[in-house]
Amino acid sequence: MIHLSFVRFLRLTISLVALLTAQAAFAEMQITEIERGVFSRPDLKLEEGERLLVGGSKETVTPTTQVPATLGVKFGVRFNVTGKHASKPNILTMLYLTPGIIEKDGSRHDKYTVVKDLSPSASSHDMAFQITETYEQVPGIWEFMIFDGDRLLLREKFELVP
């Protein structure tokens, strides 16, 4: 009788460990601590056509959803991600929906897509757009979306105003 109870206890323990391991393996990335608005860095002056590729912590985010459509303005979101793994890629797809940017050659862009592998050790990440060309000064609604595979993690809208 004692032997049967021990076998049941052992099976239950093994099942519990397997369940907890499976849950840890399927932990999903989540976005937390969101800052949205206009990014600024007073020590930086860019000319038309120049773009700041990596902003980092020197940039502050002024909260707003209304953005002036002026050259040099950079707007978007800064966020933290939980559930990143050091042993596998941490890939997010960032989708920028625009009101319709028409380039000098006449090609129209209603969206831009960026696929980014996040560093597991980075504390924060940015999804931002910087207006560097006059044809990018398109007033209207800009929508930023972040996906982990097919899962929508974040959706933010900004209105560019003339």
Image: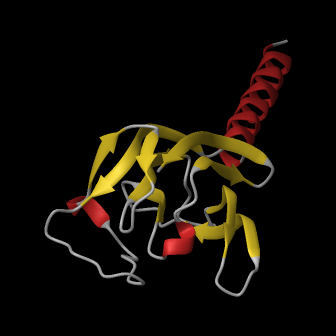
Q: Quadrant of residue 96?
A: bottom right
Q: Residue furthest top?
A: 1
> Who's the residue at 58% across and 69% down the image?
117
Compared across the picture, whether 126 is left or right of 99 comes to left
Compared across the picture, whether 3 is left or right of 159 comes to right
- How many numbered marks have been drawn onto this rendered protein structure? 0
Q: Is residue 15 above or below residue 114?
A: above
Q: Position of residue 89 (x, y in %)?
A: 63, 68
How is the rendered protein coloured? secondary structure
Q: Residue furthest left?
A: 43
Q: Position of residue 62 (x, y in %)?
A: 29, 43
Q: Quadrant of the N terminus?
A: top right
Is residue 1 in view from this perspective? Answer: yes
Q: Is residue 105 above or below residue 162?
A: below
In front of the other: 135 or 131? 135
In front of the other: 106 or 13? 106
Compared across the picture, whether 34 is left or right of 24 comes to left
In front of the other: 125 or 103? 103
Compared across the picture, whether 2 is left or right of 37 comes to right
Q: Quadrant of residue 63?
A: top left
Q: Is residue 131 above or below residue 153?
A: below
Q: Position of residue 114 (x, y in %)?
A: 64, 69
Q: Residue furthest front?
A: 162
> Who's the residue at 20% across and 72% down the image?
44
Q: Position of residue 60 (x, y in %)?
A: 25, 52
> Who's the residue at 60% across and 69% down the image?
116
In front of the other: 30 or 95? 95
> Who's the residue at 56% across and 72% down the image?
135
Q: Quadrant of residue 153?
A: top right
Is residue 78 in view from this perspective? Answer: no
